[in-house]
Image (cartoon, grey):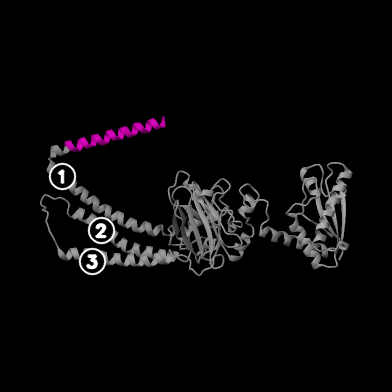
């Protein structure tokens, strides 16, 4: 019903406009076309002059009124080193274009008024004026030369890549941002500081960026849900697109670069203002204790008038500045700039995408193998455990988490040797230590069978240790079967915990 009423109103408005036009034509024919034309010329000339008086001051006043909401002004000065160069070039360009804007519009509206059609007026024709031609050609040429020169210098500084001698991971941080409909896939290097190779042909459900898992530099890379960067350290962003044209846009840092399918791009910038410092800038008070920017002291949530203020919840953001589809708005990601210490702490909470998602799946080219990082990590874990056992007066037991056997057998799996080699190394380091190798099973099956199996497994471990040079006099192998459970035998997880091999330090 509402839509019908709106349509009817529009039709009535159209009819009224048409009738007014007809009445104007009728009035003109009654008064005479010439007189009507002169009246129209006079009316429109005066309206143009009045519009100039209102329009041009309004442009200047509105720019001044809203300057604190514009990038580069008020609290929104650049948060990156290169941003001040861009802002300076923008202000220089704005200065010259504002002069042209106001002068041309003054001329436009003033001439429309002064030279409106009159009964006694006569147009003058000036075919050529060399002096005038020279002025309006030379002045714009000089200004354009200056603007282009300044812009070129700024461009060369802003778009420069990292120096050839710079070391990734030390002198600068490199991250990867891949745009897709409708999200950003983010990738950071792991402890090695280097991003691994990618191949678009490898993109799939479990590999959104197309990382080549045969490249060991990919194995420690991780995929965060937000961008976190240290203040004061250069950042090089690899920018790619997975489907259509996107744009990597960090407005507060003056970073804007297209993500083009099939053509990797990059941008290098150095954040110089942490998120907290920018918040303090937005929430600044004047000498009298009044907010310098009142709009940022309004509640962040209108439903919670006593809740946090807008400046307290401010976050830098990554957006897509291309209209890449109807879900374009959802590509927003938060960006946090923190101190170096906070950044290192954040890095410590991130987990390798390969280890958490790809490891030992069908996509893993190293399935069934131990990686160097895993070998080192297991060795470090074992050494920590034996140190604790040696230092303890009560708990002298060390569980060999990575010693396993073939199902229903005392045959060691191939990967068990890494853990047992750690035991061999420890026995060499502590020559006075003697140990008991204890085998344990769950309660499935007969008691006699489980005891025999656990005894055989304990002896299998002892045999491996002696084959590596550990004196048999320093070892005792015992199979306890299901008699010393550490968990329930009523669940799969509990039974798995009960199936174990342990070392107990007897003397040290």
Q: Residues within 10 Å of mark 3 (few under 14, many from 20)?
A: few
Marks 2 and 3, how far apart in space?
17 Å
Q: Residues within 10 Å of mark 2 (few under 14, many from 20)?
A: few
Frontmost residue, 226 versus 413: 413
Of the numbered discs 2 and 3, the one sitting upstream in the chain is 2
**The magenta stretch spans residue 19:** yes
Dominant secondary-structure state across the stretch colored magenta = helix
Residue 422 position within the rendered picture, expressed as x and y whole percent measured from the top left: 76, 61
Q: Is residue 400 left or right of residue 8?
A: right
Q: Which residue is mark 3?
A: 138
Q: Is residue 177 left or right of residue 498?
A: left
Marks 3 and 1, how far apart in space?
40 Å
155 over 41 or under it: above or below? below
Which label belongs to residue 37?
Answer: 1
Q: Secondary structure at mark 3?
A: helix
Q: Residue furthest bottom?
A: 165
Q: Which residue is mark 2?
A: 104
Frontmost residue, 375 versus 155: 375
Q: Of tags 3 and 1, which is closer to the observer?
A: 3
Region rendered in magenta: 1-26
Of the numbered discs 3 and 1, the one sitting upstream in the chain is 1
Residue 212 position within the rendered picture, expressed as x and y whole percent measured from the top left: 56, 53
Quadrant that contains the C terminus? bottom right
Frontmost residue, 182 versus 62: 182
């Amino acid at each position: 019903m509402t839509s019908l009423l709106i349509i009817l109103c529009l039709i009535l408005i159209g009819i009224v406009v048409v009738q007014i036009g007809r009445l104007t034509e009728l009035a003109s024919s009654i008064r005479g076309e010439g007189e009507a034309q002169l009246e129209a010329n006079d009316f429109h000339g005066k309206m143009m002059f009045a519009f100039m008086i209102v329009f041009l001051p309004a442009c200047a006043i509105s720019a001044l009124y809203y300057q604190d909401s514009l990038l580069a002004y008020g609290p929104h000065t650049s948060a990156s080193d290169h941003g001040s160069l861009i802002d300076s070039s923008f202000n220089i360009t704005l200065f010259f274009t504002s002069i042209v804007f106001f002068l041309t519009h003054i001329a436009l509206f003033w001439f429309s008024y002064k030279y409106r059609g009159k009964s006694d007026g006569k147009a003058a024709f000036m075919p050529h004026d060399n002096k005038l031609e020279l002025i309006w050609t030379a002045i714009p040429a000089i200004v354009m030369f200056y603007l282009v020169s300044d812009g070129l210098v700024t461009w060369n500084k802003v778009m420069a890549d990292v120096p050839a001698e710079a070391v990734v991971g030390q002198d600068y941080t490199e991250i990867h941002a891949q745009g897709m409909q409708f999200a950003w896939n983010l990738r950071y290097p792991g402890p090695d500081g280097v991003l691994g190779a990618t191949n678009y042909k490898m993109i799939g459900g479990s590999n959104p960026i197309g990382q080549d898992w045969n490249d060991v530099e990919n194995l420690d890379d991780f995929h965060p849900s937000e961008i976190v960067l240290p203040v004061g350290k250069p950042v090089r962003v690899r920018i790619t697109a997975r489907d259509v044209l996107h744009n990597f846009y960090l407005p507060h840092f003056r970073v804007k670069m297209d993500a083009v399918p099939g053509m990797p791009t990059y941008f290098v910038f150095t954040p110089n203002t942490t998120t907290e410092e920018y918040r303090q800038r937005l929430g600044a008070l004047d000498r009298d204790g009044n907010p310098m920017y009142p709009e940022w002291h309004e509640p962040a949530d209108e439903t919670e008038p006593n809740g946090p203020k807008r400046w307290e919840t401010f976050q830098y953001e990554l957006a897509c500045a291309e209209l890449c589809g109807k879900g374009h708005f959802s590509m927003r990601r938060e960006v946090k700039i923190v101190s170096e210490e906070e950044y290192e702490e954040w890095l410590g909470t991130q987990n390798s995408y390969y280890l958490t998602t790809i490891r030992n799946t069908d996509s893993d080219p190293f399935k069934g193998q131990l990686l160097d990082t895993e070998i080192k990590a297991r060795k470090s874990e074992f050494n920590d455990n034996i140190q604790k056992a040696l230092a303890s007066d009560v708990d002298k037991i060390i569980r060999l988490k990575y010693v396993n056997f073939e199902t229903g057998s005392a045959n060691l799996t191939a990967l068990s040797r890494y853990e047992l080699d750690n035991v061999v190394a420890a026995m060499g380091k502590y020559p006075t230590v003697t140990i008991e190798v204890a085998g344990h099973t769950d309660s499935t099956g007969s008691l006699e069978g489980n005891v025999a199996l656990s005894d055989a497994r304990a002896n299998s471990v002892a045999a491996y240790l002696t084959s590596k040079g550990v004196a048999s006099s320093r070892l005792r192998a015992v199979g306890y079967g299901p008699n010393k459970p550490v968990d329930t035998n009523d669940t799969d997880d509990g039974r798995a915990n009960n199936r174990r091999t342990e070392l107990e330090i007897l003397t040290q």
